[in-house]
Image: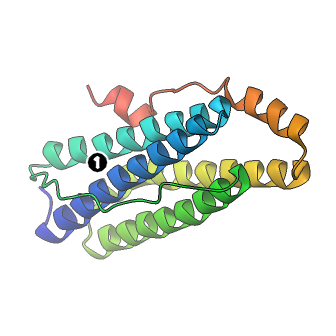
């Protein structure tokens, strides 16, 4: 059974994950409207991943006898001037999420909740990948600069990204 402290903290994380999904959906449609469907695809896949992360946390709360409390999601930005701006915002956001996951882990450790700590190990590894992916795209867009052909080619590359169900979600059923 989850302590009230852990339950509340994970519920806050659920809200943060859903806010992340909402942010990435906004980014997707910003670039869809700008004719960059490959970049939009990358953010749509990211949107699905964040929804799955929220679902993993909600499933975990339920498994441990807690209660999921969904709260309003704050508004997100709706415009980014360039893909580089969006990926810089993505990296900044993912770093905040990493800090939140680390804080959850520390709380689980302080509460001697080893099951929650174990569950969070997957998220810690996932955040390393999230930050690395955003940094790699920042590097690519920085290298390309304003070169239209380079942006076109990277847009085509990002169109190939597909959604893969995160492993804890695949095993939750």
Residue that appears at 26% across and 60% down = 10
Residue that appears at 9% across and 52% down = 67
68 and 168: which one is in front? Answer: 68
Residue 122 image point, x, y percent: 46, 47
Residue that appears at 11% across and 68% down = 4
Residue 77 image point, x, y percent: 47, 60
Lateral position of residue 68 relative to residue 113, left or right: left
Q: Secondary structure at mark 1?
A: helix
* Quadrant containing the C terminus in the rendered view: top left
> Where on the picture, by quarter, is residue 55?
top left
Lateral position of residue 162 relative to residue 107, left or right: right
- Give the tally of numbered discs: 1
Lateral position of residue 120 relative to residue 92, left or right: left
Residue 53 image point, x, y percent: 38, 44
Is 90 drawn above or below residue 96 in the view shown? above
* Quadrant containing the N terminus in the rendered view: bottom left
Lateral position of residue 99 relative to residue 14, left or right: right
Residue that appears at 62% across and 48% down = 129
């Amino acid at each position: 059974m989850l302590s009230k402290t852990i339950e509340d903290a994970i519920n806050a994380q659920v809200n943060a994950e859903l806010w992340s999904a909402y942010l990435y959906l906004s980014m997707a449609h910003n670039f869809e409207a700008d004719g960059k469907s490959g970049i939009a695809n990358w953010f749509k896949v990211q949107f699905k991943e964040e929804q799955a992360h929220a679902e993993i946390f909600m499933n975990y709360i339920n498994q441990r006898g807690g209660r999921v409390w969904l709260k309003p999601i704050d508004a997100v930005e709706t415009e980014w001037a360039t893909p580089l701006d969006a990926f810089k915002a993505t990296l900044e956001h993912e770093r905040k999420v990493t800090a939140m996951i680390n804080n959850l882990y520390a709380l689980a450790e302080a509460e001697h909740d080893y099951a929650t700590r174990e569950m969070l190990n997957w998220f810690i590894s996932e955040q390393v990948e999230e930050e690395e992916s955003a940094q790699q795209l920042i590097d690519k867009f920085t290298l390309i600069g304003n070169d239209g052909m380079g942006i076109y080619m990277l847009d085509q590359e990002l169109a190939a990204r597909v959604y893969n169900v995160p492993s804890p979600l695949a095993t939750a059923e």
